[in-house]
Image: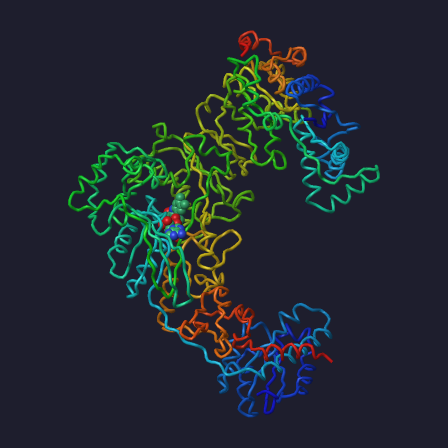
Amino acid sequence: MAYTYFPGCCMHGFARHCQDSLYAVFNALGLELRELKDWNCCGATSYIAVDEYQAFTLAARNLALAEQAGLEVVAPCNACFMVLKKAQDYLARYSNLRERIEAALARGGLQYSGTVQVRHPLEIVIEKIGIKALREKVKRPLKGWNVAPYYGCLLTRPYTLRNGMTLEAFDQLIPALGANLVDFELKDRCCGGSLTGTIEEVGDRLVYILLHEAKRHNADVLVTVCPLCQLNVETHQKQFIRRDREDVNIPVPYFTQLIGLALGIPEKDLGLDRLLVPLDRVLEEHPAELRAAA
Amino acid sequence: MNGNGNLRVGLYICHCGTNIAGTIDVKAVAAWGETLPGVVVSREYKYMCSDPGQQLIVDDVREQHLNRIVVASCSPLLHEQTFRGATAKAGLNPFFFHMVNVREHDSWVHEDKQAATEKAKDLIRAAVRRVAFHKPLEKKRVPIHPDVLIVGGGIAGIHAALTLANAGKHVYLVEREPTIGGHMAKFDKTFPTLDCAACILTPKMTAVKKHPNITLWTLSDVTQIEGYVGNFTVTVKRHPRYIIEDLCVGCLECIEACVYKQAKYPDEFNLGLGKRKPIYIPFPQAVPQLPVIDRETCIEFKSGRCKKTCVEVCGDRKAIDFKQQESTETINVGSVILATGFQVFDARRLPYYGYGKFPNVYTSLEAERLINAAGPTQGEVILRDGRKPKTVGILHCIGSRDENTNRWCSRVCCMYSLKLAHLIKEHTGAEIFNFYIDIRTPGKGFEEFYQRLLNEGVHFIRGKGAEINTWPLDPSEEGKLIIRVEDTLIGKIRRIPVDMVVLSVGLEPHADAGDVRRLFNISCSSEGWFLERHPKLAPVNTFTDGIFLAGCCQGPKDIPDSVAQAGAAAAESLALIDSKFVELEPNTAYILEEACSGCKTCIPLCPYSAISFVEAKKKAEINEALCKGCGTCVAACPSGSIRQNLFEDEEIFEEIKGVLAHA
Ligand SMILES: Cc1cc2nc3c(=O)[nH]c(=O)nc-3n(C[C@H](O)[C@H](O)[C@H](O)COP(=O)(O)OP(=O)(O)OC[C@H]3O[C@@H](n4cnc5c(N)ncnc54)[C@H](O)[C@@H]3O)c2cc1C
């Protein structure tokens, strides 16, 4: 099974470790990723807040390029995922917006007919591989790890998950890897988004609440499915400790890093060394066991 | 009058103020009308429906010996009856009149005055040619059956039933639950007077049971209704209670004797807050005072090997019958009152309030049961974990005034929230916070009740509760339900930690309201409430004659309004019964017997089952009382032997020729 891979700005930049693990895990699961040629900004963040038409035009260009490839598109960042899907929804629903965007695409020699399926990699793992099959593939169960799932606020918005898909279905990934699922009430809350850079006081507080609550539930790890959440929640930890608040230090791996560990993929292929809050302590306390060969 | 020999038509064109005359040149049309063959008088007048307008017709008939009338004005829905009346008053058969709609079909929908005027002429020419062929017809009078069916035994159904029964009419009251009483039976006190709900409701419930004029069927559904105003035939399915009603004396010893020593199963009446046995009575004052057996949980039904201690203790009375079957009753009634009430909004649809997830988040209906002295905690307000709440948050508008769920205001929640605040405070001394968008207290004594609550020291925070969470940010929040809210009076986001949350869930139409609506052939509003014929002037009538509405099935309302409406529905029903006859439109189909070949094509096509086959004659026969004049059989008859009054071939053809004769 092959997919068109839309990395977005994060995966090629600060989230290289997420990308490494995504490639490694998809490869191990027999899923091929082919990076979209000549992709551009997805249209998220400031764009969509300032000018929806421009944001959707950017998204539509990516979709038009992807349509030529004819494969489903994997968008591993929640913001890319949502903007691409929202653009599709708006294009289908509002004919005057569609006409403007089609004209813009045409000027660049492109056209989009609306056939592309945009998927989140987590969705693919759950739907295409399945919890049961994944559990069978686990070589190093993450035994003893208390893992809190953190999905961020974008996945539960309109336009995003397919009908019938819920965060609760995603939660099942964690026990499948052999870890303990922490009941994390804040799993669909905001990570601070760009507020951590603009209104720092508000952004910081949102991150702090997440970490504080994860600690309170004795989570060893907060696993994310979005490189932007990963960045926010991870990079701001030091700040809190420095400001003399309690120790909220907690590793925040991308979900394919955890899957990779459990599948027995070598740590160096999973970008673990790029985590600012390393997994070392967890790995020492709960050495992942090698499952006896069946 | 074929051939127009002595045809003398009076033609009247109405201005309808400027509604018609503003677009159509009525003077020109009237002048042109005089030139039409057969037209003796052609006039225009400001308001034909007014008394002087009608009088014009009467006078002209008398003076000019008219024998046909055509009025060009508004829709026949509005004034056909008016002008038929005037025609009859003038001494002609009322069906020698024909109406032309030059308002809705012409002046209101066109801007080009000249073209509209020409169109009016075409329509009028058609009518004048048609009316020549009208035959004298008689309206049939059919007697009205005096019995009444009431569906739903909440306070509205109960009140309507007693009103009618006291007036000497026989009432069938059909309720699908094991007891009547509806929602009101679940309350402890009622706003704004705080009178005890049971004290005012249960005497009425018992009166229903005792009344010689009321047949009460619980655990029953209406499955079919046929016929028309005055003459409905209704099929009622009665589900087994596994208790023989005539033999049971209501001693309830069987419940005591059940092999289950302890109540074990979630009890529906208490919304799962209490437990019941497989044989149970919903609540102590249930009417009828009879136990019911739940076959899902009863061991005898599950395994067939129960010791049946219930049967033993019942002894010679032999009132328990595990073999009882569903039965069907067929009744004839002349009118129907629907009083099926409402359901409360399912708070699970809004996951951010944590209902179903946090045990101490309750719905208002559950809170009613907790407060109720006959409820699962004997009126003690204690939480699922056994604690008494010290702080309670009441969140208004859950599933009301909400773009994402139900957009309407449920009308009673502000008031019942105030009532619950008062009662919980009285029972526990807890500190109480109300979270509201607006406080709506527009009833008699309602605002005064709100003032009373303010004086009692209940807190009111203006802002819709945004979410309930359990993540503490400081020690005072530890172990609490935290209500997050934007306090719009101080412009701040607040977190209020409480022990107990009450969600004031809104009122919505029953999940099966659509089925009930279709069964009774009535309409509903876009939200699913049953639709009244007119929001102001016919609030308890429906568009189906003989079917009336009462209580919350028509829209959210409190008990006083439900009772008032039930009284009105009963009065409408009485008025109908006392008019003794209904008049049926004569636009029915009839069979030309000589031509009918007895092929039976028409019989299965009739949507009203009005056609039968007479074996002796080998001919089809139409029951005029059942025929609604839809014309399906007329069109389908292969030999052309079915015809229809007011839609005779020559009438239709003349009309067509008239329209097409445009010069
Ligand atoms: C929490 C809460 C508190 C309230 N407190 C007050 C208060 O203090 N004071 C006040 O004035 N009002 C109060 N109200 C409003 C009050 O409940 C209604 O005004 C009243 O119950 C309406 O009565 P009803 O007969 O129309 O409907 P319901 O009480 O809903 O009764 C309808 C009956 O019809 C039956 N039924 C439904 N469908 C069918 C069917 N297809 N076939 C046969 N039977 C059927 C039902 O089982 C039920 O018995 C409160 C409402 C709520 C939710």
Q: Quadrant of residue B414?
A: top left
Where does the C terminus of chain B fall, quadrant-wise? bottom right
Foreground pick, B420 / B575: B575
Q: Quadrant of residue B359?
A: top left
* Residue that sits furthest to the left in the current view: B316
Foreground pick, B306 / B640: B640
What x and y, as percent, mark residue B157? 35, 56
Residue B191 visible? The answer is no
Q: Is residue B414 above or below residue B520?
A: above
Foreground pick, B330 / B198: B330
Where does the N terminus of chain B fall, quadrant-wise? bottom right
Task: Residue at 35%, 56% (x, y): give it.
Answer: B236
Task: Residue at 53%, 84% (x, y): give it.
Answer: B55
What x and y, as percent, mark residue A113? 74, 40
Residue B482 visible? The answer is yes
Task: Residue at 75%, 29% (x, y): give it.
Answer: A41
Tell me: A47 left or right of B509: right
Q: Is residue B51 above or below residue A38?
A: below
Number of marks present in the image shown: 0
What x and y, as percent, mark residue B152? 37, 53
Foreground pick, B250 / B579: B250
Q: How was this image coloured?
A: rainbow
What x and y, as percent, mark residue A260? 62, 16
Tell me: A253 left or right of B590: right
Tell me: A225 left or right of B572: right
Q: Is residue B205 above or below residue B601?
A: above
